[in-house]
Amino acid sequence: MEVRYKLIGASGRFAGCEFGVGPGIHQIGRHSSNQVVLAGDGSVSRNHARLTVSSAGVTLQDLKSTNGTYINGKKIVRQAVNEGDTLRFGDAAFTFEKASEFPSAMRVPCPEPGCSGTITSGTCAVCGRRPLICPQCGTRNAADARFCRSDGIPISPQFGNAPRGPGATGPLLNNRSPAGIAVTGARTNVTGRAAVAPEHPNPAGRPAESPAPDHRMIERLNARVLENLDFPRCVYCGANVGKQAELCPKCHARIRRCAAGHVSPASARGCVRCGKELLPVVERWGVFRGAASSGWTPEAVRPPLRLAWKLKSPESGSGWTSPVLGGGVVFAGSSDGFVYALSGGVALWRTPLDGPLRTGFTPESCAPAYDDGRVYIGHMAEAIVALDAREGSLIWQRDLPGRPSSPLRPARGHLFFGVYMASGEGAICSLDQNGEETWRCAIPSPVYSCPAYSGGAILAATAGGAVLALDAENGQLLWEHVEHGDEFNTSVAVAREGVYATSRAGKLICLDPRSGEVLRRWTSPTGNYAHSSPAVGSGGAEGMVFFGADDRQIYVVSAQTARTIASHPTGGVVLGSPAISDDLAYVGSQDGRLYVVGPRPHSIESAYRLSDNVSVASSPAVGDGQVIFAASDGCLYALESCARVEE
C-alpha cells in the first residue's frame, strides 16, 4: 500500500497550508513549475529543495538554495526525513506528517479580505470565490484583483484569468510585464527594467495627486507592446530563451510553448498570452544518443562543471549502461541485472530482470529507453521488458530469438531494436505498445547498435558492413548500402545532410536517406578503428560531425565536405559516443577524463577528471541541466554547470 504524507504549515505566511506528497519527486520553491509552490516568500529560492518519497523512505535534498534547508533546526544538504520532523525552507516552516486523509490538492488560506476559509479544490469553502493565480509567481489573489499582491504584475486575459468586463477598465500593463517591458502613463520603457515613477516632493508628507490616467491611450500602448512580443522570453526572468530551449538559460526554469511559439510556465494549462493549448514537452534524451537520433540536444550545459551527485552500484564489480532521462528522472541498468530510476543520486526504485545486462563499451551493451511513462530495456536472457516509469513494476516481457540491442521508441510509436543471435545472424524487430510483434526483418549478420528513425524509415548498421533502411510500418527493405570487407558496430546518426556511420576501418560515410547512395566519405589518417558512434550538431554546431577513434583522437568533420575541421588529442582511446549540448560536445576517454570539445581547432578542455585508473565507461546523456555518464569504478556521475547560481 502506498504511504502518503503531507506538509502542514507551522508558522508565517503558510501557516495552516497543507501540501499532499505521495510517492515520487516533489520539488519545492517559489517557481510555479514546482510541485510544492511557496509563492510570495522572498526567503524561499526559485527551486529550493527536492523531497523524494520512495519505498526506501523519504529524503530531502537542498538544491543550493540561498537561505538553506533545515530539518529540526539543523541545516542539511541531503538527509532522510521522519514522521513528525519540522522542515524549514528559508523562513517557511512545515511539519511532516503521515496523511490519514490525503488532500487531493493543496489547502491554502483564502486570499479574500475578511474570509477565514480554506481553498481545497479551486474555490473557497466559505465564500465560494475562486482566487486568481499570478502566471509569473503562482501567488493566489482575490477574485476581483487586477494586480498580483506579491510582485505587482497585472492579471488580465492576456496574462492570467481575471474577468475584463465593462467595469474592468484598468490598464493591462501598469508597471511591469512578464517580458520586462514597463509602461507608465504614455511612456514605454524597453530597457528590461520596470519604469520607476519620479518622486513628487510633498511638504505635508502625503503623496501628490496625479492626473487620471488616459485608459484608452494605455490600452493602445498595450496592444502595441503585445504586437512586439514575438521574441521568445522567459516568463520568470525576461531572458531571451531562443526558439527551441525548454529550460531558461538564465534562471533554468522549465518552460513550454504553444503552436505560435509563445512561452508559458511548464505548469500552465494553456498559453498565458493567447490561451491556446501548449505543446507537449519533448524528452530530448529518452533514448540512447537522444530523441533525434543525432546525439544533439538544444539544451546548453556550459563548463566549468562540478559534481552534482554520484551513485555507486550496490553490487561490487557491477557497472552501468549508458543512462537516459525522462520526466526529470535518470534511468540506467546495472550489469547485475537491475534497472534503476534515480533522482539527485537517490534511487526511487530498482527492478530486477531475469538476466544480466551488458555494460561498458562492448558492441552488445544495451541502454534503456523512456517514452510516455514507460521504460524499455533488453537483457542477455534474450528478452525485452516494459516497466512502469513511476513504480518500476513489470508491464510486459517479450521473449526474443536472440539478444536485443538498445531499443528505440519514437514518440508514442512502436518499439524498434536490433537482435544478434548465437548463430551469427541478426534481425530488426518491431513491437507494439502491448509487446506484440508487428514485424521482423531477418539479416545475415548481427545488429549490435540502437536503430535510428527518420521520415518513416528505420535505419540500422550491421556487423556485416551494411547500412540499411526499412519501412517503419511493415519492415520492408527500402535500400541497403554495403561496405565490403568492413563492419559497423556503432549506431547511425541522422541529420539534414544525410545518414552518418563510422566503421571498423576508420571510415565515416554519409548516405542519402532516400536512396542509400554514398554522398561523402572520410577516412582516418591513421586507419584506426572508430568505436564511437557519430554525433551531428545543430544550432551553434550546425554541419559538424563529432566522433572518437582508437588513435586517441576526437575528430570534428564537416558534414558538407567531409573534410577534417579539427582533431583533438586525448590521453586514451575514445570509445564512447559524443553528446552535443548546443554547440559543445562532451566525450569520455579511457584516460579518465570527460572532455568538452568545441567546433574550432584547439577548442578542447578537460571538463571533469576521475580518480586514477578510472575511465569513462559509457556515452554521456545531457538533460535537466546536467551531463550524466558511467565510469569503470562502478559509479554513475552527474555534472552540472558552475554557472547555475540559485537566486
Image: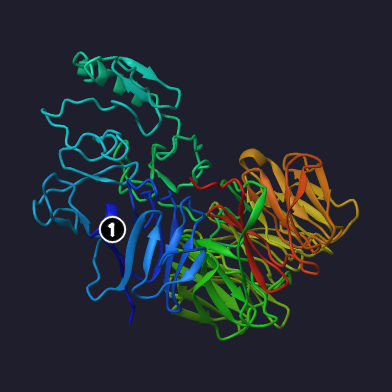
- Badge 1 element: loop
Give the left or right position of residue 247, taking residue 130 as reference: right
Circle 1 residues within 10 Å: few <14, some 14–19, many ≥20:
some
Q: Position of residue 295 (x, y in %)?
A: 64, 53
In the image, is residue 194 above or below residue 451? above
Percent from the top left, x then y, of residue 472? 53, 61
The part of the image, by quadrant, that contains residue 231 is: top left
Q: Is residue 638 visible?
A: yes
Q: Of residues 527 and 171, which is closer to you in this image?
A: 171
| Percent x, y of residue 470 | 59, 61
Q: Amino acid at mark 1?
A: Ser
Q: Quadrant of the image for the N terminus?
A: bottom left
For the point 72% across and 82% down, the residue is: 423
Q: In x, y percent, where is residue 596? A: 72, 50
Say whether residue 253 is left or right of residue 378. left
Q: Which residue is painted at 61% across and 69% down in the image?
A: 367
With respect to residue 189, does 424 lie above or below? below
Instruction: Say left or right for 400 vs 159.
Output: right
Q: Is residue 515 visible?
A: no
Mark 1, residue position:
11
Q: Nearer the viewer, residue 122 or 574?
A: 122
Outermost residue to the right: 526
**Residue drawn at (39%, 37%), measured in percent from left and top?**
262
